[in-house]
Image (cartoon, rainbow, N blue to C red):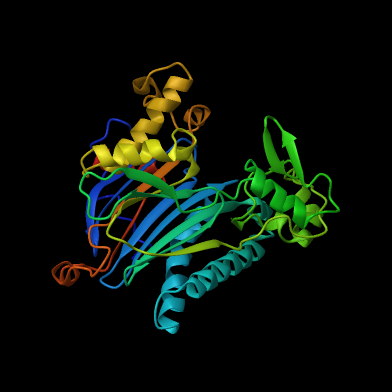
Amino acid sequence: MCTRPLERYFGGGGSRDKLLWHVDLKPYASGDYSMAAVQANSLLEDQGQVFTSPSATYVGVYDGHGGPEASRFLTHHLFPFLHKFATEQGGLSADAIRKAFDATEEEFLHFVKQSWTARPQMASVGSCCLVGAISNDVLYVANLGDSRVVLGRKVSEGNENSAVVAERLTTDHNVGVEEVRKEVEALHPDDAHIVVYTHGVWRIKGIIQVSRSIGDVYLKKPEFNRNPHFHQFGFPVPLTRPVMTAEPSILTRKLKPQDLFLIFASDGLWEQMSDETAVDIVLRNPRLGIAKRLVRAAMREAARKRETRYGDIKKIERGRRRHFHDDITVIVVYLDHPLGFSKGRLAHTLVDCTSSPVDIFSSNADEAQD
């Protein structure tokens, strides 16, 4: 179902910003969720999706780089693999999630090999990958790259006036983080230039900031990198072994009554606000359209940094807007029944999948014509 996005029916059409798409609120087995995305690049490189059923809910945020192909590929392949391995093993588990990531990476490698003659540049396309899954009162979070999920939770159980804090559930696989940089350097003790500080940021081989991803085949398979056919695209980097990995970090957490909501977002959001600010916005505002509210708050902050107005940024075309902010995808998931899911709610939960548009600008233009 995720191969047929529902953008024609939810969000986008009523917004003055033709590069903004949103789903104000939809139900799932244990609460509600809200989605929003804004396009800054000429081609939208972010993708987001939510799959719901009575037994499990999957959330995906895919932040592509080098092109949109890898993030789009994930929307068609990762959830089916996740369902396949969970079914084979009799339920969701960290092992099933890891196998789904491995299978998706292998399938993308196969896609690159098939495309090699006509489109060798596909070897340089990749995507960060953030997945959340809720099943049987357990939350699983797996990630590659620097998209992030933050939990809003009460400090004290059963206390209505308890403070709510932000708890980050993922590690940013970005060499701008000293711990990650040291991890990469430790894996390559014979390469003094494995991580290079260039143009104000740390990058692996002076090229890429994230250390884990789906794709980026030329940085994982030296044979692609050495091929002269590939060098015409300007990526000749001498490699003797992989400098990136598709091994996800996986967290398993038993949900508790004080766990209130989850914020899944690409780094376009986190570049503009802290975990605490995002949690505070969700806590203090109505549910309806909350993901859109977070996206707009990020855009306002981007405007402030550039000493311009939010209204002016909304008028900037895709491509040019990337000078002000990145593509941003946000999915907020409320945890109303984290323990002992409501039987009544389960009975009315449909199997459904909502995906963000492949291209927000074109989608909104089509709706305007309709």
Q: Is residue 23 positioned above or below 3 on the image? A: above
User: 227 left or right of 160?
Assistant: right
Number of marks in picture: 0
Q: Is residue 317 positioned above or below 238 on the image? A: above
* Furthest-top residue in this view: 307
Front residue of 23 and 159: 159
Indicate the quadrant containing the C terminus: top left, top right, bottom left or bottom right.
top left
Q: Quadrant of residue 208?
A: top right
Q: Quadrant of residue 276?
A: top left
Residue 122: image x %, image y %? 63, 54
Indicate the quadrant containing the N terminus: top left, top right, bottom left or bottom right.
bottom left
Please tell me which residue is depicted at 62% across the width and 48% down the height of the picture: 210
Residue 54: image x %, image y %? 25, 71
Please tell me which residue is depicted at 47% across the width and 66% down the height of the picture: 77
Q: Quadrant of residue 287?
A: top left
User: 297 left or right of 96?
Assistant: left
Residue 265: image x %, image y %? 42, 46
User: 370 left or right of 250?
Assistant: left
> Can I make out residue 366 in this image?
no
> Can I make out residue 97 in this image?
yes
Please tell me which residue is depicted at 34% across the width and 22% down the height of the picture: 311
Front residue of 72 and 342: 342
Please tell me which residue is depicted at 65% across the width and 54% down the height of the picture: 216
Residue 244: image x %, image y %? 68, 56
* Furthest-right residue in this view: 190
